[in-house]
């Protein structure tokens, strides 16, 4: 084999010399390209391929809410809207959770149309935030079985009617009402309290009843005057009711609904004190608002979303209480509340949580 290779190489050399002799010398150097073929054994290499899988992109969860008043009402609507914003941020922002809303929907037929439109548009959860929307919701929900609906304040999920995609929620407002009634009675100099409610229904009535019972339990001789305007939205009627209460000697006022801005204005102008509910109302009158019961809807909203994603479209009823953190008493630091009064309020909260106090029981 080596001899064969040697002879072949020698032949190439001889031919090269002959050709060089016969070829005239070029004027410029000639460049010759030579391709070498190297034969060898193939090498098998083990190649490890790594790749980062595409992240699973979860679809945006879409929530729509229909509200009787504005998202800045310092009361019922604002508390729920702010709860939605808090949940949205925790989920990762608008890309993770979309929020659409219709505010000022006092007209029930208009609200019903909005509820239906949101469901038809494919929203995952449609919240009818008002007890006045219950009948409409029961009519709309069966037409959209893939949509979850929610409404309050109520604990009726319409399961008795065969409806399975409705959540219900209720603020046990009598609990905070009882505590604030305790504080108002103990702070009152005149011994007269004025309570202005909107309509004798839902969390408004619960709050009024709890406030009156807490005041009477803390101070049996206190006079609690209660009136209802018959409207959730009429600010002027609420202001007139507050004026009447103060004219009758009340120095401590309270009330429920988005119309209380009128009553708070009267308390501020005439040197009275105010106790709020549903939202911290201190900003409306820092010199008049003593304390507020605040609704925290975050836990309920989160559970409804989690339930929907798990395929549970409705059928749950939720409540806000002191015990589950859904109700919170917030004081206004600008107004001094005696420590013994705060101690009495704390004792009332503890009694409500451990079951030794029933806020709806009329004191004997």
Image (tube, grey):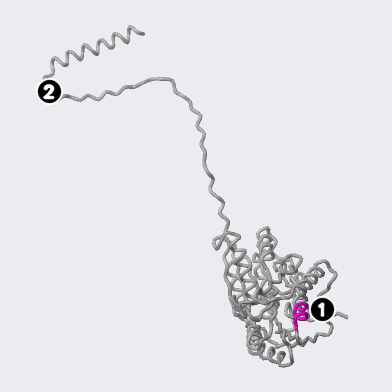
Magenta region, main secondary structure:
helix
**Residue 32 is at least partly visible in this image:** yes
Q: Nearer the viewer, residue 351 or 113?
A: 351
Task: Mark 1 and mark 2 in contact? Answer it, CB < 8 Å.
Answer: no
Q: Quadrant of residue 201?
A: bottom right
Q: Is residue 113 magenta?
A: no
Q: Nearer the viewer, residue 197 or 41?
A: 197
- Does dot 2 land on a helix, a strand or a loop? loop
Specify the label residue 218 is tagged with: 1
Q: Quadrant of residue 324?
A: bottom right
Q: Is residue 184 magenta?
A: yes
Q: Nearer the viewer, residue 236 or 41?
A: 236
Task: Find residue 29 and report its horizontal and vertical position in percent.
Answer: 16, 24
At x 28%, y 8%, the residue is 7
Task: Find residue 83 and report its horizontal and vertical position in percent.
Answer: 63, 68
Q: Earlier in the sequence, mark 1 or mark 2?
A: 2
Q: Is residue 47 above or below residue 1?
A: below
Q: Specify the quadrant that holds the N terminus.
A: top left
Query: Disc 2 marks which residue?
Result: 26
Callout in the foreground (1, 2): 1
Q: Quadrant of residue 106?
A: bottom right
Q: Is residue 6 above or below residue 357?
A: above
Q: Residues within 10 Å of mark 2 (few under 14, many from 20)?
A: few
**Residue 115 is at least partly visible in this image:** no
Q: Is residue 292 above or below residue 197?
A: above
Task: Find residue 227 and report its horizontal and vertical position in percent.
Answer: 74, 88
Q: Is residue 116 left or right of residue 4?
A: right
* Total marks in image: 2
- Does dot 1 land on a helix, a strand or a loop? helix
Magenta residues? 181-188
């Amino acid at each position: 084999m080596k001899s064969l290779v040697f002879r072949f190489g020698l032949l190439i050399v001889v031919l090269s010399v002959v050709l060089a002799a016969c070829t005239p010398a070029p004027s410029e150097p000639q460049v010759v390209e030579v391709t070498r073929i190297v034969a060898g054994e193939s090498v098998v290499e083990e190649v490890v391929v790594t790749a980062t899988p595409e992240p699973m992109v979860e679809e945006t969860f879409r929530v729509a809410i229909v509200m009787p008043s504005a998202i800045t009402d310092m009361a019922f609507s604002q508390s729920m809207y702010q709860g939605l914003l808090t949940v949205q941020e925790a989920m990762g922002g608008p890309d993770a959770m979309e929020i659409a809303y219709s505010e000022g929907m006092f007209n029930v037929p208009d609200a019903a149309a909005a509820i239906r439109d949101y469901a038809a548009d494919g929203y995952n959860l449609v919240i009818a935030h008002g007890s006045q929307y219950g009948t409409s919701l029961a009519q709309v929900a069966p037409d959209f079985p893939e949509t979850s609906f929610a409404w309050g304040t109520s604990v009726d999920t319409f399961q008795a009617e065969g409806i399975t995609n409705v959540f219900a929620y209720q603020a046990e407002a009598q609990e905070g009402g009882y505590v604030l009634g305790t504080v108002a009675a103990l702070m009152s100099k005149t011994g007269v309290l004025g309570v202005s409610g909107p309509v004798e229904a839902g969390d408004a009535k619960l709050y009024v009843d709890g406030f009156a019972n807490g005041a009477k339990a803390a101070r049996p001789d206190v006079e609690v005057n209660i009136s209802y305007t018959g409207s959730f939205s009429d600010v002027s009627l609420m202001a007139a009711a507050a004026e009447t209460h103060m004219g009758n000697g009340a120095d401590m006022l309270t009330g429920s609904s988005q119309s209380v801005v009128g009553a708070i204005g009267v308390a501020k102008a005439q040197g009275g004190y105010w106790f709020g509910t549903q939202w911290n109302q201190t900003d409306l009158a820092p010199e008049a608002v003593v304390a507020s019961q605040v609704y925290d809807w975050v836990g309920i909203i989160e559970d409804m979303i989690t339930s929907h994603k798990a395929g549970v479209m409705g059928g749950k009823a939720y409540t806000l209480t002191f015990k589950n953190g859904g109700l919170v008493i917030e004081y206004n630091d600008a107004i001094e509340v005696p420590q013994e009064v705060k101690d009495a309020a704390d004792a009332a909260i503890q009694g409500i949580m451990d079951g030794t106090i029933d806020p709806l029981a009329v004191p004997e």
